[in-house]
Image (cartoon, rainbow, N blue to C red):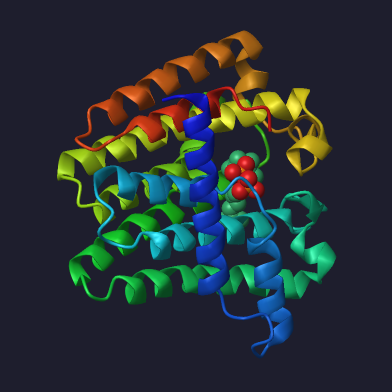
Amino acid sequence: MEATDFQKLHEAFILKAERAIDSLLPPADTHPARLHTAMRYSMQAGGKRLRPTLCLATAEAFSNQTDARYAATAVECIHTYSLIHDDLPCMDNSDLRRGRPSCHKAFDEATALLAGDALLPLSFQLLAQGYAANAELARQLIIELSIAAGSSLLVGGQAEDMQTASTENEEHRLEYVLQGKTAAMIAAPLAMGAMIGGGSKSDIEHCRRAGRAAGIAFQLVDDLLDQSSNAEKMGKPVGADTHNGKFTFVRLRGVKATEQRIQTLTEEALKHLQACQGKMDFLCALVTNLATRDR
Ligand code: GRG
């Protein structure tokens, strides 16, 4: 796919995601207004919109008959709740997110905690209501997202990452954290998009696997950028991993091995996408671009 075509499509997906978020979130002035304002503050702070883009683009790659916007927004709700909670003083204690004060800095800790809490059920409400006309689809989407966001993946990965570093089983622990904290929430929108687009069982599984591989690659790129980029470009503090003594793949194996693994994982993701029956050009270009991103 030509770079300019990719760019145009990418921007269109981001715009579609932004519009869906705006229309599906409770209005800021609905009581309790401070809570709803905080939810919108974090949801509408920009960000790459990678997860909703993956969901919208995958659904379209198979068919555009069913509206993927509910699922795209649901995934971004979970992602944003996890960022809000991760920034809290009891977790990463980070003051900057998506280029502006993190939710608890702009509001207060209790409001940030509750804004994250409220985004979580909103996500499942969107799936249950948005796909009510196809109860089996709604059921599958809810299972996919709840597993990805649950105690064995997103929350489990975060819990493992919060444990004090030890030298025992470091590689094993690191893989668990990578799968849970990052890859799960990248695999889910791909699998969900394939479900919405009516992909076969095999398509859905290939998309899920592509997401897992691309998700780990995404995190490894993030780890490299944490060492080499700056806060202005990233919209969040950099150097935090080193500062917090976090075990990352880069710290464990070095830059060269990390770059090599990013390439291998990207090839694996592409292989899975190319094995699908849909029109996968945009998704392949997106996965390739993620490996070379600089923010
Ligand atoms: C609190 C349950 C709970 C989980 C927190 C998301 C998270 C888990 C922690 C944030 C720190 C981190 C490095 C997470 C790994 C996933 C990741 C790279 C998130 C940032 O995703 P981007 O770069 O963010 O896509 P934007 O803001 O662009 O959407």
**Does residue 280 appear in this view?**
yes
Q: Viewer-proximal residue, 113 or 188?
A: 188
In the image, taking residue 121 as reference, residue 196 lies left or right, namely left
Q: Viewer-proximal residue, 31 or 172?
A: 31
- In this view, the residue farthest toward the top is 256
Q: Residue at x 22, y 28 (%)?
A: 275
- In this view, the residue farthest toward the bottom is 31
Q: Residue at x 32, y 48 (%)?
A: 60
In percent of width and height, residue 258 lies at 58, 16
**Does residue 169 appear in this view?**
no
Q: Residue at x 35, y 72 (%)?
A: 130
In percent of width and height, residue 69 lies at 41, 62
Q: Residue at x 27, y 61 (%)?
A: 66
**Vertical placement of 248 versus 97: above or below?**
above
In percent of width and height, residue 107 lies at 81, 71
What quarter of the picture does the N terminus occupy?
top left
In the image, taking residue 212 as reference, residue 161 lies left or right, namely right
Q: Viewer-proximal residue, 49 or 179?
A: 49
In the image, taking residue 245 as reference, residue 141 lies left or right, namely left
What quarter of the picture does the C terminus occupy?
top right
**Vertical placement of 87 versus 181: above or below?**
below
In percent of width and height, residue 55 lies at 40, 50
Q: Viewer-proximal residue, 130 or 148?
A: 130
Please state the total of marks drawn on the protein image: 0
Q: Quadrant of residue 102?
A: bottom right
Q: Quadrant of residue 208?
A: top left
**Vertical placement of 179 versus 76: above or below?**
above
